[in-house]
Image (cartoon, rainbow, N blue to C red):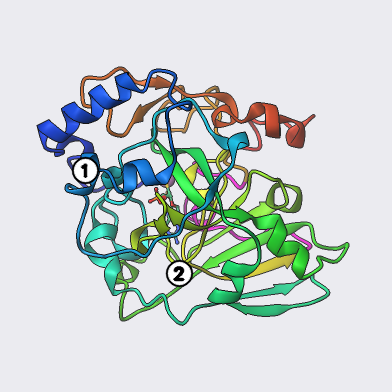
Amino acid sequence: MRDSKPPRIPASQITPESVWRSRRSWLKGAGAGLLSWGGAGLLGSGSLIGSAARASQVQGRLAGTPNPAYQIPDAPTAEQDVIGYNNFYEFGTGKSDPADHAARMQTRPWTLTIEGEVEKPRTFDLDALMKLAPMEERIYRLRCVEAWSMVIPWEGYPLATLLRQVQPTSKAKFVQFESAVQPENMPGLHDRIIDWPYVEGLRMDEALHPLTLLVFGVYGKLLPNQNGAPLRVAIPWKYGFKSGKSIVRIRLLDHLPETSWARIAPHEYGFYANVNPKVPHPRWSQASERRIGDGFFAPRVPTLMFNGYADQVASLYTGMDLRANY
Ligand SMILES: Nc1nc2c(c(=O)[nH]1)N[C@H]1C(S)=C(S)[C@@H](COP(=O)(O)O)O[C@H]1N2
Ligand SMILES: [Mo]
């Protein structure tokens, strides 16, 4: 997003060659992909990736029931890349800063407050939230606005399930997500690029859409801190920056909320931020993407309208000028 720092070597390029090779052959062997893809257990506990994964945090298991409606043919990105190549500016702007520094974040006790245009404002503690609905495993594409992408098995349940608990009023038109601020534990807060806390938001119908997931885990384990522990959202048809991490507050509003990246560079990052290969970022094309883990010489992948979720979400934007509302 920012262009003032020298490029870092992506995690995918420093993967030991043997691991990289066996991963490729495994992927080829997987053939039809989703048919032989057995869910988090297969990769999470397998020798293929486990030995190379970061050992800085031992994460508890969180098994979600694979939801067959959200399996995709794309091969999942290696766990070590999902948890080692991140954007989480509270811990620094480099891709390995979150994995290097986020272990310091305190994730227990944790509460989430929901307030604003709701009949029943409430503060939930984490254990109550985790029991609210059965955990599902869904495999979603994640497309960063920086034109790289991953395929990630998340554990969670629809955000709509939580929002219904607090009974939105008829005035609730938008939702704002506020991320945690822990000055002692977040070295990136010294960088004033973002006016902390990190805030993001959705229109109410987007927030209630069944694809919008409240996420507690990844790869069959509780979220590692660098991925937004203990809870974050995943909105797979939008650029990754919409998916706020380590959320402490949700506000339901009658007006369009402030959002961090739109505040920093409104000409570059809009409120909607729907993945759209036809609308370039002012400084780069969005027509294709680099799939993390594919290797430096692999061809780029064409970017899909709404990140491949057009069947499910295009109707939310009927009649809207997607060039003006980027
Ligand atoms: N609080 C907070 N949430 C955030 C960010 C951030 O810097 N701070 N970065 C966003 C961006 S740009 C992306 S691409 C995704 C990355 O999620 P991942 O690291 O789990 O892949 O998190 C999003 N959520
Ligand atoms: Mo991103």
Which residue, given by chain and number where applicable, does mark 1 sit on?
A: 47
- Can you see residue 160? yes
Type of the residue with mark 1: Ser
In this rendering, the answer to whether 117 lies above or below 277 is: below
Q: Is mark 2 on a helix, strand or loop?
A: loop
Q: Which amino acid does label 2 sit on?
A: Trp
Q: Does label 2 or label 1 sit earlier along the sequence?
A: 1
| 244 with respect to 321 (left or right) | left
Place of residue 118 in the rendered image (x, y in percent of width and height, measured from the top left): 79, 71
Q: What residue sits 51% from the left and 39% below the top?
A: 140
Looking at the rendered image, the quarter that the C terminus falls into is top right
Residue sitting nearer the eye, 266 or 124: 124
Residue at image point 78% right, 57% down = 173
- Between 63 and 265, the residue placed more toward the observer is 63
Residue 162 highlighted magenta (yes or no): no
| CA–CA distance in space, label 2 to label 1 | 40 Å
Ligand 1 contact, mark 2 (Cβ < 8 Å) = no
Expressed as whole percent of the image width and height from the top left, the position of residue 208 reads: 73, 51
Could you tell me what secondary structure mostly forms the magenta stretch?
loop
Mark 2 surroundings within 10 Å by alpha-carbon count, few (fewer than 14), some (14 through 19), many (20 or more) = some
Specify the quadrant of the image occupied by residue 199: bottom right
Above or below residue 96? Residue 19 is: above
Residue on which disc 2 sits: 196
Over which residues does the magenta segment extend? 254-271
Q: For the residue with label 1, is its CB less than 8 Å from the closest atom of ligand 1?
A: no
Choose between 259 and 239: the one closer to the eye: 239
In the image, taking residue 257 as reference, residue 93 lies left or right, namely left
Q: Which of marks 2 and 1 is in front?
A: 1
> Is residue 3 something one can see in this rendering?
no
Q: Locate ligand 2 by image quadrant.
A: top left
Q: Does the magenta stretch include residue 256?
A: yes
